[in-house]
């Protein structure tokens, strides 16, 4: 199985070939064009659950059909703020797990419902959870590539005359306002949830705590409860 470095490189290679302007932070990701290119080059089909008369359980947000090289995504979720993440998660299953010795019924047992997309709740204890973690990590890097994040982070900083390269999460109002502004701007550009943006910022070293805390999740829930939309 691929590690974090390999997964990140894989997402960058995909974007370099099919969405270079997005990779370098110049344009927003055109997900429809990416999907079209994946079909053209890999015969990876994408269908929406409403398109197949709800044959997939209504609580399922996404599914990868190994045998038919098809991604199924909830039509309702596709137009939501987390739609790109869900699609990218399923694309991750295709690129990372198609060669695993798994039957379709094993994929079906990994139903991608609400819990599978909670990026703060990675679990490594069994093969199923490891597979979901990989798909989440793939999705995060596909929809928020590091170079694009840096470019858009710098742009958002300049808009509020922020000189620091670090967002401090603490009790100071000015820091909270800067943090909220930049996260919101990045969420709009990357067309994803604020929580995904926060996790990516933290993983890239852009966030620093101004006090001791148990976890990033506890801090975010304390200061920004409304941001936990996935």
Image (cartoon, rainbow, N blue to C red):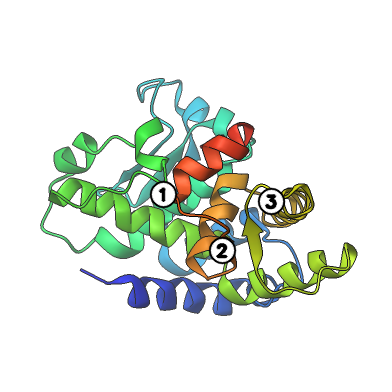
Which residue occupies 73% across, 62% down? Answer: 28
Does residue 131 appear left or right of residue 168 in this picture?
left
Q: Earlier in the sequence, mark 1 or mark 3?
A: 3
Q: Is the residue 101 above or below the residue 125 in the image?
A: below
How many tags in the picture?
3
Q: Are marks 2 and 3 in contact (CB under 8 Å)?
A: no
For label 3, the residue is 187
Q: Earlier in the sequence, mark 2 or mark 1?
A: 2
Q: Is the residue 63 above or below the residue 39 in the image?
A: above
Other residues around mark 3 within 10 Å, as few (<14) / some (14–19) / many (≥20): some
Any mark on residue 215, and which? 1
Q: Position of residue 5 (x, y in %)?
A: 36, 77
Q: Position of residue 41 (x, y in %)?
A: 47, 69
Does residue 137 appear left or right of residue 182 in this picture?
left
Quadrant occupied by the N terminus: bottom left
Does residue 28 appear left or right of residue 135 in this picture?
right
Q: How far is disc 2 from disc 1 in space, using C-alphas?
A: 12 Å
Q: Nearer the viewer, residue 163 or 213?
A: 213
Q: Which quarter of the picture shows residue 166?
A: bottom right
Q: Position of residue 54 (x, y in %)?
A: 43, 21
Q: How far is disc 1 from disc 3 in space, using C-alphas?
A: 22 Å
For label 2, the residue is 208
Indicate the secondary structure of the residue bearing disc 2.
strand
Which residue occupies 51% across, 55% down? Answer: 199
Q: Nearer the viewer, residue 151 or 220?
A: 220
């Amino acid at each position: 199985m691929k590690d974090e470095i390999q997964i990140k490189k894989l997402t960058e290679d995909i974007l370099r070939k099919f969405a270079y302007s997005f990779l370098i932070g110049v344009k927003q990701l055109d997900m429809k064009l990416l999907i079209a290119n994946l079909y053209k080059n890999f015969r990876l089909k994408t269908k929406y659950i409403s398109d197949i008369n709800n044959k997939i359980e209504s609580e399922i947000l996404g599914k990868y059909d190994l045998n038919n090289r098809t991604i199924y995504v909830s039509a309702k979720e596709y137009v939501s703020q987390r739609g790109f993440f869900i699609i990218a998660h399923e694309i991750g299953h295709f690129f990372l797990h198609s060669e695993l010795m798994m039957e379709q019924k094993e994929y079906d047992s990994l139903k991608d419902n609400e819990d599978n997309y909670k990026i703060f709740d990675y679990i490594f204890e069994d093969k199923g959870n490891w597979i979901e973690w990989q798909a989440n990590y793939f999705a995060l890097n596909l929809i928020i590539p590091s170079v694009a994040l840096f470019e858009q982070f710098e742009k958002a900083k300049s808009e509020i005359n922020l000189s620091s390269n670090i967002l401090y999460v603490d009790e100071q109002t000015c820091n909270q306002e800067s943090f909220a502004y930049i996260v919101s701007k990045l969420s709009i550009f990357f067309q994803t949830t604020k929580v995904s943006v926060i996790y990516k910022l933290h993983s890239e070293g852009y966030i620093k705590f101004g006090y001791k805390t148990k976890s990033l999740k506890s801090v975010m829930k304390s200061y920004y409860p409304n941001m936990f939309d996935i």
